[in-house]
Image (spheres, rainbow, N blue to C red):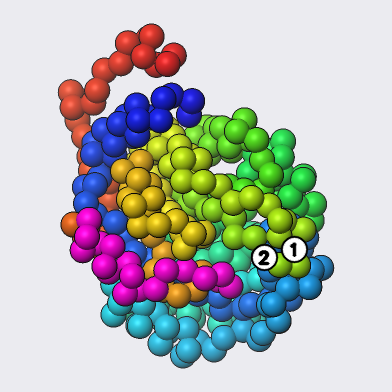
Amino acid sequence: YKLPFTELLFRASVVHRMYFNPLEVQRCTLLSIKTGGCNEDCKYCAQSTRYKTFVKPEPMMGVDAVVEAAQRAKAAGSTRFCMGTAWRELGNKKGAFGRILKMVEEVNGLGLEVCCTLGMVTEEQAKQLKEAGLTAYNHNLDTSREHYPNVITTRSYDDRLQTIANVRKAGISVCCGGILGLGESEADRVGFLTELATMEVHPESVPINALVPIDGTPMDLNESPDVFQMARTIATARIIMPQAMVRLSAGRLSFAAVEQTMMFMAGANSIFSGDKLLTTANPATDADALLFDSLGLKGKAPFSAPLQLHAEQLPRHSAAEMRA
């Protein structure tokens, strides 16, 4: 993480090319299917009932409306469709869960990767999601274990790790990342990445988010991360979790095209398209198409596995290089 910046980007770029085509970037769409009304106290979140923000509670979307949104996303170039709900846990929401399972089944039938972020889930709920055709489950750690209590008190770090374990046991791909700009230190960023990289199996997907300060939340005056902090985190994630999809996620609108380009060079190979990311603004699809054209990038097909390398193709590092 602390390597000279250009050297870090170079090493990340080398690793990226070992496992992925660097000109392929997956386009994803994230839809809030149940907005607002969450009773948790995440200090960055506009959807918490504890803070007065622009977000008002809304009922859960119907299955048909979600499927139509997924069809539009596919037509616009997305190959992964993610659905999010604003609540602490799936719990005993049997009616809502039944509709979500139907949504997963229908979206899966469109040939898209399907991801959900529904808060904490049990082993049995994860199993049912897998049977419905869920590709991936998102449950972020947000930050380091040490800084976490300064951000959230209504759900423990170990609660999050347990949900990830439940998802993994069900055979669902794990999507787990964090947010920069939560008042964390550089050591917290390293600690958060270390937590991910020392899991028994690396997450297949690692979203790196930049805080979007929301008026009315306790973090509305926080300073968002700059391009160097984002690129440094992305590059480190790429090196230590080489086969993961590293996703440039929330907050992308605050970075110019040339800054986003630096993040692609650092190893990001996925973005979220569409004008909204849950409740925050996101670059429009047309702007992303123009960016892809300018950089010579192309979309990544769904269900694309990392490149498989033989042992003799792997780079060999000296002990001194590893310590560096």
- Checking the image for residue 194, the label placed there is none
Q: Is residue 270 visible?
A: no
Residue 288 lies in what quarter of the image? bottom left
Q: Which secondary structure, mark 1?
A: loop
Q: Position of residue 282 (x, y in %)?
A: 47, 68
Q: Which secondary structure, mark 2?
A: loop
Q: Are marks 1 and 2 in contact (CB under 8 Å)?
A: yes
Within 10 Å of disc 1 (Cα), the crowding (few <14, some 14-19, many 20+) is many
> Does the magenta-highlighted stretch encompass residue 279?
yes
Residue drawn at (65%, 35%) of the image: 185
Residue of label 1: 217
Within 10 Å of disc 2 (Cα), the crowding (few <14, some 14-19, many 20+) is some
* Three-letter residue code for mark 2: Ile
Residue of label 2: 214
* Three-letter residue code for mark 1: Thr
Residue drawn at (21%, 47%) of the image: 21
Q: Position of residue 127 (x, y in %)?
A: 53, 62
Relative to 102, does residue 160 appear above or below in the rendering?
Answer: above
Residue 238 lies in what quarter of the image? top left
Magenta region, mostly helix, strand or loop?
Answer: helix
Q: Which residues are magenta?
A: 278-295
